[in-house]
Image (cartoon, grey):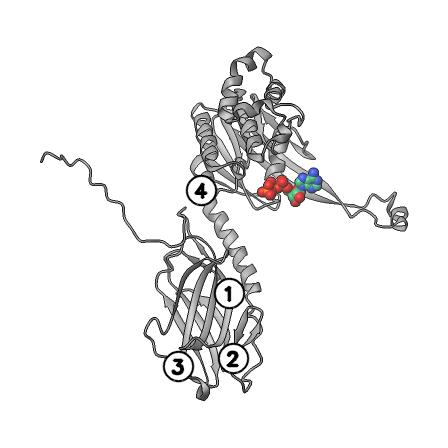
Amino acid sequence: MMSNIAIRVSDVSKKFKIFEDKPATLKDRIIYRSKGVFQEKWVLRDISFDVPKGKMIGLIGRNGSGKSTLLKILTRILQPDTGKVEIVGRVSSLLELGAGFHMDFTGRENIYMNASIFGLSRKEIDGKIDEIIRFAELGPFIENPVRTYSSGMYMRLAFSIAVHVDPDILLIDEILAVGDNAFQKKCISRIESFKSQGKTIVFVSHDNGVMERLCDELYWIHESRLVEHGEPRKVVRNYMDFLNESEEKRLTAESEIVAAPEKHVETLEVVEQGERWGNKLAEITNVKMVDDAGEEKHFFEKGKSATILISYEAAKLKIDKPVFGIGVYKMDGYCCYGTNTHIDGEKMNLDDSGVIEVSIEHLNLVAGEYYLDVACHHENGTPYDYITRALTFNVKSYEEEIGVAYLPHQWIHKGGQNEDE
Ligand SMILES: Nc1ncnc2c1ncn2[C@@H]1O[C@H](COP(=O)(O)OP(=O)(O)OP(=O)(O)O)[C@@H](O)[C@H]1O
């Protein structure tokens, strides 16, 4: 292996045996006893790559794509079925939460045990233990058995040990899923300082923003194979586009409008049917969202245009003062925006059937999943037809803003002004 390479993965494949359900009856047990009923599932196929010394690479991919299995192969917890892994340097890893801890030992005892596995002598650990405890922010709890720790405390101790054993190579799996924000920031800044010391890092995280910012190169694993690698921004974009496309297909399949209440019954009684209610004098027959090309979509880019199309049928002679409304909600039910034709000063005259268009020039919502309520009702509020969660849509954005709405803005720095002038 060339001297500038820290990790070489050559044609690695790994399969697991998936055992079918245990027999439920004695008869099943006798029949299945000697058969060992299982299927083989390939979790990694033909994976090859080199990690140069001093580089940080990231593994991205959907749940179950094989990232953790690859990290376990790098740490030698698992052996590949084919191919090989070569590593130059001392490896420290942070994989499953607390793997390697002894539950009945105190935090302090676990530090000695764990750090010695990484090859540190007792004297070396004596010299580092105060700093390990300080970094883990465990205070007096360090004298308690780790089985009493919260997952955050556990994680802090594991991370602190992993970064204090002076490894050449650090393998980290999804540390950002546990622990509070402050500790996550501390972990990230520690990883950054590791990087600047020329250490080699392999990192797995579902936080694409962090991956993009920290890693020199990203590897995207999909269904056990390496499908793309390269410059982080490019790989993250392609991965996100892929996820959005898959989600678009899922949402399209789910977007059948809820069954309409029975049509034009001669009554003004409001009938409630699950997520839909109204007196049926006007009926919403279809709801969809289209992009600026008129194509039906469930994914929209932040700030781009979107149009909501509400098709209706109405017993127009019986309809009085109709109002159409929309409400956009976050998936947790938080209302982001709602309006109707009455609020907007639009007077509606319905036909027997027609389509109402709500044209939104800039869909200024931050990235996330939203649902849409649509309604047709009398100006006094009596519902003709109200459908909650008529459809679900996503807003995608390559930026990492938080909150609900995008407020168009710019930053201006007016520095260098002398108060004496
Ligand atoms: N010991 C095992 N026995 C059988 N199947 C396993 C075993 N370990 C993992 N798997 C399966 O292998 C596949 C890959 O799992 P892996 O944990 O590597 O994925 P991942 O990309 O890390 O997912 P996540 O992002 O959810 O952590 C999954 O389908 C998982 O169920």
Circle 1 is placed at which residue position? 391
Q: Which mark is residue 209?
A: 4
Residue type at numbered disc 3: Lys
Q: CA distance from mark 4 to mark 3?
A: 49 Å
> Which numbered disc, 4 or 1, marks the residue closer to the eye?
1
In the rendered structure, which disc, 3 or 2, sits on the residue that comes first in sequence?
2
Circle 2 is placed at which residue position? 279
Across the whole image, how many numbered discs are drawn on residues?
4
Compared to residue 132, the image places residue 319 above or below, namely: below
Residue 320 picture location, percent across and down: 41, 84
In the rendered structure, which disc, 4 or 3, sits on the residue that comes first in sequence?
4
Residue type at numbered disc 2: Asn
Q: Residue at x 64, y 35 (%)?
A: 12
Q: Quadrant of residue 92?
A: top right
Circle 3 is placed at which residue position? 321
Q: CA distance from mark 3 to mark 2?
A: 14 Å
Q: Which mark is residue 41?
A: none
